Image (spheres, rainbow, N blue to C red):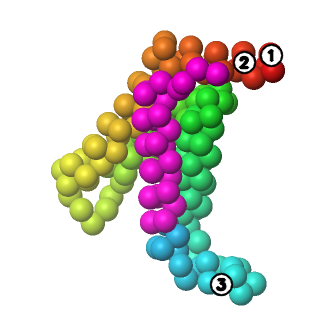
Amino acid sequence: MKKRSIGVTISATIAIVFGAFSLSQYLVASQSWLKDLLHGNLPENVSLMTIFVSTLAIAYIVCGIGALRLKRWAREFLIFFMVVGIFYYISGIFTPACAPVIVLVFLLTPFILVHALVIYLLTRPKVKAKFAEAERESNSA
């Protein structure tokens, strides 16, 4: 099997880091309902956003690991989840919050740009070719 490209390595690493950061952030923030869940009680105040972001974070980690192994499904799902992430961050800019919109734009723009970078890297012809080549090799083995 040929060595994976730098674009794949960068994209997968970004996905794993983003996933780990997001998951740890939401696990710390939702520590109270995790304690309830561990004690067999149903948590009272689990928000759908917490579940959504935690699921997205786990998907980032799984897809990042799959991308490092040059799995085609990982590349396709990672592109999809990065698009979902962009929409999530954009919706955060327009959602009423305690911070002014300009502050939200300033804080969220780097995340949007990193997601766009991953999409760009994963859609480059050489990167697509690496995934196709790895799939052909795994099918012939």
Left or right: 44 as drawn, with respect to 28: right
Question: How many numbered marks appear?
Answer: 3
Q: Left or right of 27: which side holds 112?
A: left
Circle 2 crowding by C-alpha within 10 Å: few under 14, some 14–19, many from 20: few
Rendered residue at 56%/49% (across/down): 61
Q: Nearer the viewer, residue 38 or 122?
A: 122
28 relative to 118, above or below: below
Vertical position of residue 115 compared to residue 138: above or below: below
**In the image, residue 75 lies at what x, y percent?**
58, 29
Tell whether label 2 touches label 1 (CB within 8 Å): yes
Marks 2/3: CA–CA distance: 47 Å
Q: Is residue 113 visible?
A: yes
In the image, what residue occupies the spot 20% across and 54% down?
103
Circle 2: residue type: Glu
* Disc sitting over residue 31 in the figure: none
Magenta stretch, residue numbers = 1-25
Q: Which residue is mark 2?
A: 137
Callout in the foreground (2, 3): 2
Task: Judge whether 11 appears above or below 124 on screen.
Answer: below
- Residue annotated with mark 3: 36
Residue at the farthest bottom position: 39
> Which mark is nearer the camera, 1 or 3?
1
Asked which quadrant contains residue 136, the reply is top right
Mark 1 vs 3: CB contact within 8 A:
no
